[in-house]
Amino acid sequence: MFLPGEHGSWIEEQRRDLRDILVRALECLRDIALAEAELGDAVRYAAEITELEPFRESSYRGLMQAHAAAGNPAEALRVYERCRRFLADELGAYPSPESEAAYLEILRGSPGGSAAEVDPEEADAPRPELAAPTGHEPPRLGRGKVAALVVGALLLAAGGAGALAVTASDQRPLEILPTSLVRLDPETLEPAQVVRIGPRADLVVVAGGYVWITHGLLRYTDDDYLRDAGDRTLTRVDPSTGEARVVGGGLAPCGIAADPSGDVWVANCFASGQGANVVRVDAETLEFEATWPLPAGDGYYRGMVYGGGALWVADASGAGDSRRLEVTLLKPRTGVRRSIRLARHASALAWSKGSGDLWMTNFADRSVSRLHVETDDSTTFDSVAKNPGALVVEGDSVWVGDWNAPAVLRLPAVGTGRASRISLPMTTRPGGITSVAAGAGGIWAAVPDDRAVWRIDPKTRRTTRIGLRYHPWGVAVGDDGVWAVVRSHNE
């Protein structure tokens, strides 16, 4: 941000100008990526534009074209539906004839014009005549170099306006981007790395030297729109290079868990009638190594965890699926599959390495359950939180985030006992916890309403707020720090 913390009409004008330059740069990158058939990058750039300019219909059309060019017409149609709903909800308006025409073209499967064209009006514009070759043509630049030059020129145009912010400090802290993955130094609690990613990020897993992120699973509303919005994707980020790669192959993630090998398991919740499954994704090649069918349902989230040589997958949560009362055990090495009947619907899952127990939050019942794997017996802790959400086991304690209150609850991992409550001292309400993680000397809780990640010292119960400007929905701990994903909008 230009001159953060400062206000004034001139400053706001400069910020608008810089934002426009950023959007133009992303449009250049999107168009060049389409022309170069770098379709994953094209989708990512187009998605970033829609995030920055949600009221600009041309941004949705660009994203539709990118999806269609990537061979995903269904995703393109879902983008149109998201645009239609957004305009109807926010403005009481309908999409323009241009957007409607793009939608119908994709719906019919017509090849239309070039994938690099975004504005259909440009197709009829007169094209300049080219001079005949003279035999002394200057060397031509590749499209990738052209993209770099164009974007560089746009950013240089911002240099004069941003000079005050850049020269304010030679060691100024990293700027948090509105839709990004942020690595926090667990000692200084300062951002150490920022990687731009796609919108609506939520679950975060560290595995195989990569950071894995799901998009579009968790939101504050509970309806079928969550499952059919067309933005539930998986991203793999390489921390060593900052490369963010969208994983294709028709995934519709509703849960994710790390495998001991470094690969990841992804649960898919497809549209009604298409069933459900869990697939193992190779960390290096991104190929699908194994696929297992799962009981279908109308939910949009599945708790998952790997522990005791098995993958544990809860029944789908959300959209009225709390009546389902099973957890599925899968043993990839032996092919064993078993369904275990529970007394209450399981939401999030966590594994206790010390005792070999499976822990589950019961979101609607305000309780947390522990499954003794060897006997299939369970113990329930009632009245733990308003809505127990994410949980993690660390040592002899189980840490549970309250989805609807600024509090983290602590339960004994072994034996019985009452939950102790650690309230986060914030004024924002409801201030619910969407994700918790353990490691690097602390317990970490993501609080989107507060625009912050909170650190809890497990020994002293002292709490520390880490402001991130935007809305963090997911948090995880790796060998190189604490990773959090932030959204520009809290939805």
Image (cartoon, rainbow, N blue to C red):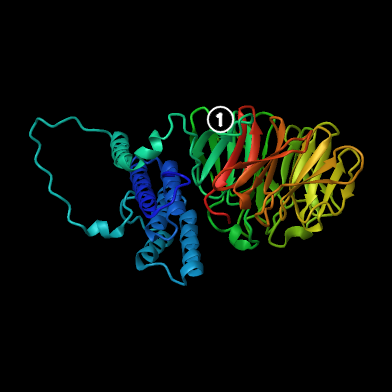
Q: Position of residue 374 (x, y in %)?
A: 89, 37
Which residue is at the front of the view, 123 or 344?
344
Quarter of the image containing the C terminus? bottom right
Q: Is residue 117 left or right of residue 312?
A: left
**Numbered-mark total:** 1
| 42 up-or-down from 102: above or below | above
Question: In the rendered image, which quarter is residue 321 located in?
Answer: bottom right
| 302 up-or-down from 350: above or below | below
Question: In the rendered image, which quarter is residue 191 located in?
Answer: top right
| 287 up-or-down from 232: above or below | above
The residue shown at (30%, 59%) is: 120
Residue 442 appearing in the image: yes
Residue 290 appearing in the image: no
Which residue is at the front of the view, 425 or 274?
425
Q: Which residue is mark 1?
A: 284
Q: Secondary structure at mark 1?
A: loop
Residue type at mark 1 is Glu
Residue reaching furthest bottom? 92
Q: Position of residue 355 (x, y in %)?
A: 86, 33
Which residue is at the front of the view, 303 or 18?
18
The residue shown at (70%, 42%) is: 436
Q: Position of residue 422 (x, y in %)?
A: 78, 45
- Using a 10 Å C-alpha cutoff, classify the residue at mark 1 as few (fewer than 14 neighbours), some (14 to 19) or many (20 or more): few
Quarter of the image containing the N terminus? top left
The residue shown at (78%, 60%) is: 323
Q: Position of residue 267 (x, y in %)?
A: 66, 46
| 88 up-or-down from 116: above or below | below
Q: Is residue 304 left or right of residue 63?
A: right
